[in-house]
Each structure stands twice: as structure tokens, then as C-alpha cells.
Amino acid sequence: MYLELFYMHSTQALSESQINGFVSLLKDSDTSVLSLMAQQVSSLSPESLKLIDDIASKSNDDDLIDNWYHASRLSLKYMIEDWKRIHHHDLEKGLFLVARVYTPYLDEIAYSEQLDSYAKRVSELLDTKATTDDTIKAINTVLFDEEKFSGNQSNYYDIRNNFLHTVLETKLGNPIMLSSVYILVARRLGIDVHGVGAPGHFIIKFADQFLDPFFGGRKITKEECVIRAQELSVFWRDEYLDPIEEAFIVARCIRNLVAIYKRNNELDKAADISEILKLI
């Protein structure tokens, strides 16, 4: 009965009785039931998901905790498959899906509005005669001077550096996520900015310039990138500075997560996330 009810109200928040019914079904370890539950997770409101997550995490029921984890992960796999098939050019959507690894009940709207507000403030600093340098200065002013986004050098391997929503909250991140924030703000203004997966350090390309959001959006030269590659014993190829597609950015984010989980000896999580990586 409850599964039928969830299909009927797929775009609505669940009532208390529906949530209790959902939780009751989660206690069933049957694979087919968990698969059906996972299909519903993507359509539930963040508020409903948060309540379910709270009930599961605070319970003493190991089966419920385990089944909720697997249902939410399976749901994420379904959503990533849809993104890869239909929305693979939408970097923001892809990064929010990765963020569900950390926060299954993520409410994306508030964070998208936060990016909207940054873009609006940048636009207010520009006029119709703005040059590339003017645009870079305006974005850097908003993101790095006013909002104080910066690379988390003191705790580089903090898991929160890898998720778009936590980076927007803490203003700290790793190179790929700070670059992504820069890209998402710039693209809201119709500015053509791309990610560049240089060896050992993710940067961005805007017009004919390379910028390093991890270090305040400073300009970076090809020679600096070559030196970094040599320090890593990587044979340099000029194509390292070519723009990369959104799917590769999302895949690189997931690889970072796998590396961190392995570094923390959380091998089960590393294996679990590796399965998600195969879908990209």
C-alpha cells in the first residue's frame, strides 16, 4: 500500500504516517523491495529524506541503518545514470549528485540561489565595455575578497572540501571544487569558462588565460603547469591544458573521494564510491 502511495505523491513531502510506512519497508532486506524504495528516494523532498535519515541514524536497528544506506546509494546510482544519459552537460546538477554521497537529503535550491547571488553581485561590477581582465577582477572580488573563498591548505584532505554544498558553506575547498564554484558563477553571466585538469592541480581557462581559484583566482602560466608536472614526474603534454568535459570533472571529483576514503582506511566506502565512478 505504501509503495503505491509514494508513486501517487512523488513530488510532495511525505506525511508522518507515510514516513513511518517508508521506514517500516526499509526494515525489509528483500532486494526487490530495496530496489523499489531506492527508486522513490530521488522523488522525495529534502525534508522527508532528512526525517527518514534521522530515524534510521538514531535507531538501534542495524538492518534499518544498513538498508537505508544501501537504498540511498542505489538511488544515487539511478540518478547518476539519468544525469549521464540526459543531463551530462549540466555540471551543477552533476556536482549536487556527488554531494548526496555526504548529504542524502540535500536541498539544492538554497545553494543554487547562493551561486545566483554571487553572479548578480559580479554583474553589478561590470559594464558593457568590460574586458576579460575586468571580468576576472570582478569575479575575484566577489568570491575571494568579499566572500573569502580559499583553498583549504591546512586540512587539504578534509572530506568536506569535495562537495559543492559544504564548500559553499565553509568557503574552503580543494582545487577542483573552488574551480567549479568559479565556473558556475561565470556561466550564470554567460561567460565561457572551462575546467582544466592539469597534472596535480585543477585550474580553469577563461579566454586565453589560466586561473587558479585555489589561490585566489590568480593568473597561472603554462610554464608553472609544466614545472608542477615535472615535480610529479609526469611527462608533459600540451593537451593537459585543454578544457575538459563536465562528465570528466564529476568523475575527477569522485576519484578524489575514493582516494580520501582509502587514505582514511575506509575501504568499504572507497569500494562503494568506485562503483558510482563506473557510471560516469
Image (cartoon, grey):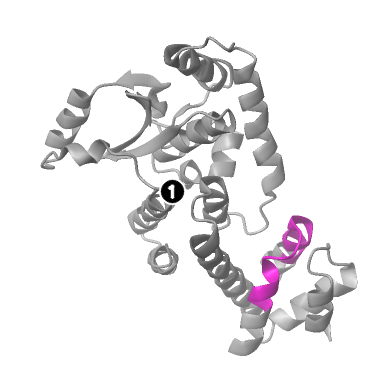
The correct choice, above or below, for 252 with respect to 179 in the image is below
In the drawing, does residue 76 fall left or right of residue 236? right
Q: Quadrant of residue 124?
A: top right
Label 1 belongs to which residue? 246
Q: Does residue 38 belong to the magenta stretch?
A: yes
- 135 or 102, which is in the foreground? 135
Residue reaching furthest to the front: 128
Q: Does residue 65 belong to the magenta stretch?
A: no
Q: Is residue 60 visible?
A: no
Q: Secondary structure at mark 1?
A: helix
- 11 or 58, which is in the foreground? 11
Q: Amino acid at mark 1?
A: Glu
What range of the chain is rendered magenta? 37-52
Residue 144 placed where, x, y %?
51, 20
Magenta-colored segment: predominant secondary structure: helix
Residue 207 placed where, x, y %?
37, 25
Q: Quadrant of residue 167?
A: top right
Residue at (28%, 39%) from the top-left corner? 242
